[in-house]
Image (cartoon, rainbow, N blue to C red):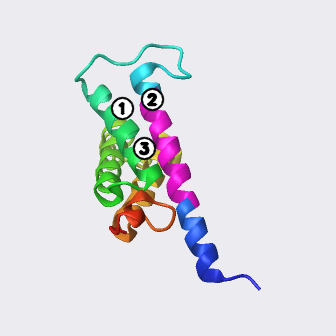
Amino acid sequence: MLDRGRLESFTYAALRIVSGVLFAFHGAQKLFGLFAKKPGPEMFTQMWVGGVIELVAGLFIAFGLFTRPAALLASGTMAVAYIQFHWKGALDSAFFPLVNGGELAILYCFVFLLFCVKGAGAASIDRLLGRA
């Protein structure tokens, strides 16, 4: 018989690690042109700052280090990304993520909000340090 608590803990840790790594890859792509055809943005522009947040917060989330503040910052960054770059304040069908291409930004926003509320969980540095 499966232990649902253990399975839930493992699944949550897997979600945190995979989400963090994928988010960090977005930052690496923005900052270093990793897997991109164009160079990264100029330093200290909004896009560059977003890339730094994605890279650093993504790694912190993946390793489970300072998970709550990193996830709160990442969630807020994705909320801003959705509003500013996808929705753009439109009051027509462009409001909807399927139309404006913002599904990933909204999904990241709410997944990171979950990590902020729930903490790092199992398989995390926060847990090893007694902060989970």
Q: Are marks 3 and 1 in contact (CB under 8 Å)?
A: no
> Split into 4 quadrants, where in the image is the N terminus?
bottom right
Q: Is residue 125 visible?
A: yes
Image: 36 above or below 67: above
The residue range painted magenta reads 14-28
Q: Residues within 10 Å of mark 1 (few under 14, many from 20)?
A: many
Q: Residues within 10 Å of mark 2 (few under 14, many from 20)?
A: many
Q: Is residue 99 visible?
A: no
Amino acid type assigned to the residue bearing label 3 in the image: Leu
Amino acid type assigned to the residue bearing label 1 in the image: Gly
Numbered mark located on residue 51 in the image: 1
Q: Is residue 24 magenta?
A: yes
Q: Nearer the viewer, residue 96 or 18?
A: 18
Compared across the picture, whether 99 is left or right of 117 comes to right
In the picture of the structure, the residue carrying the numbered disc 2 is: 28
Tag in front: 2 or 3? 3
In the picture of the structure, the residue carrying the numbered disc 3 is: 59
- The residue at the point 42 percent across, 26 percent down is 30
Q: How crowded is mark 3: few (under 14 residues within 10 Å), some or many (20 or more)?
A: many
Real-space CA distance between mark 3 and mark 1, rounded to the nearest whole angstrom:
12 Å
Dot 2 lies on which element? helix
